[in-house]
Image (cartoon, rainbow, N blue to C red):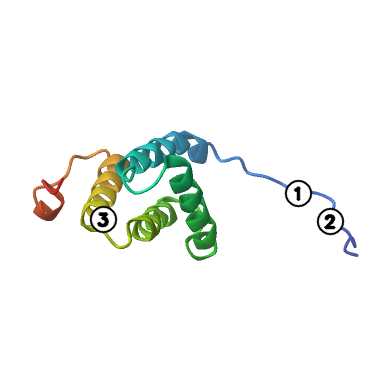
Amino acid sequence: MSRPSRLAVIGFDADDTLWENEVHYRLTETEFMGFLADFAEADHLSERLLAAERRNLKHYGFGIKGFTLSMIETAIEVTKAFLRRVVSFTATRMICCRTQKPPSPAFPSTIGLF
């Protein structure tokens, strides 16, 4: 059996789960932009976050881990390491929103820091 010398077909899997979750990513990004509004304009923050996501794609792929780490990286860059609020916000927001559960009293360090 001979192999074709040229690529004949490309297939795409437009996974519905990605599209269903996109709204949550965009809402989180909007809230993240508001949270860092004292440090930079929303357009600038969005550009920085997208650049971080692109850099991190090869390491983490698509998904919640890469998105979360890219937000933290962006926050570090933009705030010049002013992280207490940012890390608490990011961790709490991502855990609560993605699991649909309220913050646990077992993590008191993430409650009441704002």
Q: Which residue is mark 3?
A: 87
The amino acid marked with disc number 2 is: Leu
Q: How many marks?
A: 3
Label 3 crowd (10 A; few <14 / some 14-19 / many >=20): some
The amino acid marked with disc number 3 is: Val
* Residue 35 placement, left or right of 30: left
Question: Foreground mark, 1 or 3?
Answer: 3
Q: Position of residue 54 (x, y in %)?
A: 54, 57
- Asked whether the residues under the numbered discs 1 and 3 touch, taking CB atoms below 8 Å apart as contact, a structural biologist would say no
Q: Which residue is mark 2?
A: 7
Q: Which residue is mark 1?
A: 10
Q: Position of residue 45 (x, y in %)?
A: 43, 47
Label 1 crowd (10 A; few <14 / some 14-19 / many >=20): few
* Residue 97 placement, left or right of 21: left
The residue positioned 56% from the left and 41% from the top of the image is 15
Task: Please report whichever mark, 1 or 3, sits nearer to the chain's N-terminal start.
Answer: 1
Image quarter hosting the N terminus: bottom right
The residue positioned 76% from the left and 49% from the top of the image is 10
Q: CA distance from mark 1 to mark 2?
A: 8 Å
The secondary element bearing badge 1 is classed as loop
Q: CA distance from mark 2 to mark 3?
A: 46 Å
